[in-house]
């Protein structure tokens, strides 16, 4: 009985290895590459013929002249897309509370005129460490700093944030968000085309 | 919970319920050997497999022979995954040039994927070659799920049959589960996910310069970002559908390439509960009364929904200690608010809370947010959902046979209370049946609590803890709760890739999978052999609201008796300190 079932098991395992381990992923890859080639290859953004990033993978920004992205817990540098990771610090861990307060202090010292509460997503690390988004409010609180830095009118910048705001699906699925890399690429474009006062 | 959150939960449940009947009926036809619309396409492949493997579609084995077949098949799978990992450095399809995996990690991972747990002590994009991911892990995603479904179908036949000495054939049900159910659904889901941006390519990584100046921890400039890609969508589809949960990337479904949009999130979330929910209906069809299936699904939902609301509420309330720094945690149309550490902006609080509850209720274990960084009460829910024994949806197949064992216990206790002979669907419940049911229910807490005690008693266990105070205890409790219930999610801060956790966790996964499947089959064999006793005045109907409430009470009371003390030492005291 054992010998018979071992033989059956071997044959079934080999055939399933071929079907689900080779044919299935190869077939899905072929169809995906034909129908959704941009998405299947990482939603790479091309500007002037060169790849500048992925629309789905965040990049770190903390120069005063850019919209900042969320903190990232990946090692050894933030937004390391070859090794995703979250902080996994617990809510009560002093290291986390200190990091959050430090992030708030940095944001406030970069713009001393800012008095409203800092949106929580801007001072907490995402689960993946690669979150490409911040909330629309987190983008808006940064507008005065960036306007001053480049001498661009804040009205233009608020409009740019609005333009980049993705709403929840049907109004309730998911959360409203702004893609930081796409926003900053357009910000660079705005500066070059003379979006000055 | 916000209004938008409540709408999301309601919409999700309505869509899930709408799928139960059509999919449940389809699966009943597949397991009954009836023709379906996929037979012209898949029938020839099924017949080819039968011919090569020497299987006849009308094979009938008793419970012992089926158990042996199941164990042999899983042992073979273990050997393949283990050897693939150890030798991947010498094998092709390794664009990241990863070396062979060390023995303790390879043992842990092989057990983990064969047992449908998918606990991952490694980061996928930094450890496993494409070959290992495809031939080893993806294949086990299919066949470990199909093993659970096949055991369930054998179990259901035990309930459906009377005066019978066989339950069907493990092989026939295994092959049907993969070919007619898991594979077609995976193809559809993976293409849906690719349309949203989940990557599907055999390329390695792509290097792209950063726009802003970036420095690493040591202060050195980092000019560019290496973006890992791979054949992701095909693996994500089956890991969600098969309650596997093992991600391609380290951060699982929080990674934007595994789960890029709220649409992909909703699809993956639905895929977690799709088959476990529909199998309740399949059960109803197979025992000849669909009300019996709906009753079980109702009991699952009665437990599930309040826990979702509890998690969402706790996470939306945020973390009090942040406020001192002037952090806004109030939800508004412009921001998610709440506790966003370890969560993605595109999902916000509700989709993260709903996922966390669903992935622990079902023994899926994939995560779209880091459970370790949840508030204490959010973490409490994820622990409880697993500690109920993975019977609220649970693993594909294994969750329902676990719940059916609770049904038998509920019938038995009710019988004792009113002084009647306990019976379920025409079977008299006797001492042997109760012994098997008790084994199923009591082995798990022994594993979880024993493992946790060992983990906190030994330096080898304690040294992996990364959070201070009661949360450190919760990390160890979570590790053994997850492996001891074949869930696979983690409080991922725990440094789990150590010989202690790899070996102890591996043993917990082995025991919880097979020491439960074997008594389940024995119970099925015993039930099938009994003569049918006709329903009488004294028969307790098992499809009524009263019985559903009774079943819910039994599940909750057994869970509470086992785990309240441990939970009090971890998340509950942490909540009080918050």
Image (spheres, coloured by chain):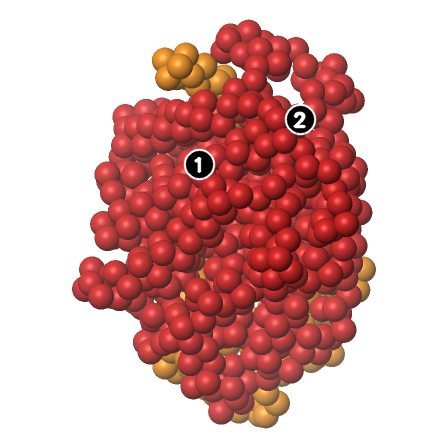
Q: Which residue is depicted at the point 34% across and 70% down?
A: B473
Above or below, A16 relative to B394: above
The orange-tinted chain is A
| Front residue of this view, candidates B55 and B546 | B546
The red-tinted chain is B
Q: Which residue is identified by label 2?
A: B31
Residue that extends furthest to the left in the rendered view of this protein? B459
Q: Position of residue A193 (x, y in %)?
A: 68, 64
Q: Which residue is depicted at the point 77% across and 50% down?
A: B537
Can residue A142 be seen here? The reply is no
| Front residue of this view, candidates A149 and B390 | B390
| Circle nearer the viewer, 2 or 1 | 1
Q: Which residue is identified by label 1?
A: B518
Mark earlier in primary sequence (2, 1): 2
Q: In the rendered view of the protein, which quadrant contains the C terminus of chain A?
A: bottom right
Q: Quadrant of residue A103?
A: bottom left
How many numbered circles does the render carry?
2
Above or below, B157 relative to B371: above
């Amino acid at each position: 009985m054992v010998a018979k079932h071992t033989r059956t098991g071997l044959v079934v395992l080999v055939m399933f290895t071929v079907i689900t381990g080779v044919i299935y992923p190869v077939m899905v890859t072929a169809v995906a590459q034909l129908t959704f080639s941009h998405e299947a290859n990482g939603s790479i953004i091309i500007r002037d013929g060169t790849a500048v990033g992925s629309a789905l993978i965040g990049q770190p920004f903390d120069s005063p002249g850019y919209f900042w992205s969320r903190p990232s817990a990946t090692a050894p540098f933030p937004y390391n897309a070859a090794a995703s990771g979250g902080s996994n610090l617990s809510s009560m861990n002093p290291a986390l509370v200190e990091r959050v307060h430090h992030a708030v202090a940095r944001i406030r010292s970069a713009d001393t005129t800012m008095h409203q509460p800092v949106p929580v997503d801007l001072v907490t690390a995402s689960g993946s460490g690669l979150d490409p988004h911040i909330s629309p409010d987190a983008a808006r609180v940064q507008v005065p700093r960036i306007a001053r830095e480049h001498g661009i009118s804040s009205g233009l910048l608020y409009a740019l944030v609005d333009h980049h705001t993705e709403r929840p699906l049907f109004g309730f699925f998911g959360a409203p968000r702004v893609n930081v890399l796409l926003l900053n690429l357009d910000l660079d474009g705005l500066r070059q085309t003379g979006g000055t006062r | 919970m916000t209004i938008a959150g409540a709408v999301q939960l309601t919409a999700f449940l309505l869509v899930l319920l709408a799928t139960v009947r059509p999919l449940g009926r389809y699966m009943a036809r597949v397991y009954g050997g009836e023709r379906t619309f996929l037979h012209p396409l898949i029938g020839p492949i099924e017949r080819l497999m039968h011919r090569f493997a020497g299987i006849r579609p009308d094979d009938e084995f008793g419970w012992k022979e089926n158990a042996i077949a199941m164990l042999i098949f899983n042992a073979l799978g273990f050997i393949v995954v283990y050897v693939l990992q150890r030798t991947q450095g010498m094998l092709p399809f390794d664009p990241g040039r990863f070396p062979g995996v060390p023995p303790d990690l390879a043992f842990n991972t092989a057990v983990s994927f064969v047992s449908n747990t998918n606990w991952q002590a490694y980061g996928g994009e930094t450890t496993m070659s494409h070959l290992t991911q495809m031939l080893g892990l993806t294949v086990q995603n299919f066949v470990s799920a199909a093993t659970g479904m096949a055991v369930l179908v054998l179990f259901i036949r035990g309930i459906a049959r009377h005066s019978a000495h066989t339950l069907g054939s493990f092989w026939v049900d295994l092959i049907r589960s993969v070919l007619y159910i898991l594979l077609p659904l995976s193809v559809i889901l993976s293409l849906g996910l690719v349309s949203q941006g989940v990557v599907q390519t055999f390329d390695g990584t792509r290097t792209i310069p950063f726009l802003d100046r970036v420095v690493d921890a040591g202060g050195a400039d980092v000019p560019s970002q290496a973006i890992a890609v791979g054949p992701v969508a095909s693996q994500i589809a089956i890991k969600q559908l098969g309650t596997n949960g093992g991600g391609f990337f380290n951060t699982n479904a929080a990674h934007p390439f595994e789960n890029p949009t709220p649409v992909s999130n909703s699809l993956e979330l639905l895929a977690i509960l799709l088959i476990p929910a529909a199998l309740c209906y399949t059960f109803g069809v197979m025992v000849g009364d669909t009300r019996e299936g709906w009753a079980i699904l109702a009991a699952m939902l009665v437990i599930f929904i309040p826990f979702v609301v509890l998690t969402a509420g706790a996470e939306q309330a945020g973390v009090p200690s942040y406020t001192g720094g002037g952090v806004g945690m109030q939800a508004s149309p412009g921001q998610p608010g709440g506790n966003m550490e370890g969560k993605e902006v595109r999902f916000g609080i509700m989709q993260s809370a709903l996922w966390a509850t669903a992935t622990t209720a079902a023994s899926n274990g994939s995560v779209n947010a880091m459970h370790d960084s949840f508030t204490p009460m959010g973490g409490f829910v994820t622990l409880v959902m697993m500690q109920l024994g993975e019977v609220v949806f649970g693993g594909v197949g294994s969750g329902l046979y676990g719940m059916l064992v609770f049904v038998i216990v509920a019938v038995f206790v009710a019988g004792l209370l009113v002084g009647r002979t306990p019976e379920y669907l025409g079977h008299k419940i006797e001492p042997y049946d109760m012994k098997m049911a008790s084994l199923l229910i009591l082995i798990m807490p022994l594993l979880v609590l024993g493992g946790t005690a060992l983990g906190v008693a030994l330096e080898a266990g304690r040294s992996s803890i990364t959070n201070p105070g009661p949360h450190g205890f919760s990390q160890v409790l979570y590790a053994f709760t997850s492996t001891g219930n074949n869930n696979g999610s983690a409080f991922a801060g725990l440094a789990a890739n150590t010989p202690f956790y790899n070996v102890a966790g591996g043993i917990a996964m082995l025991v919880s999978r097979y020491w439960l499947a074997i008594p389940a089959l024995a119970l099925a064999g015993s039930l099938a052999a009994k003569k049918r006793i006709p329903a009488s005045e004294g028969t307790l109907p098992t499809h009524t609201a009263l019985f559903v409430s009774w079943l819910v009470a039994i599940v909750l009371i057994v869970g509470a008796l086992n785990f309240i003390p441990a939970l009090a030492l971890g998340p509950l005291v942490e909540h009080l300190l918050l």
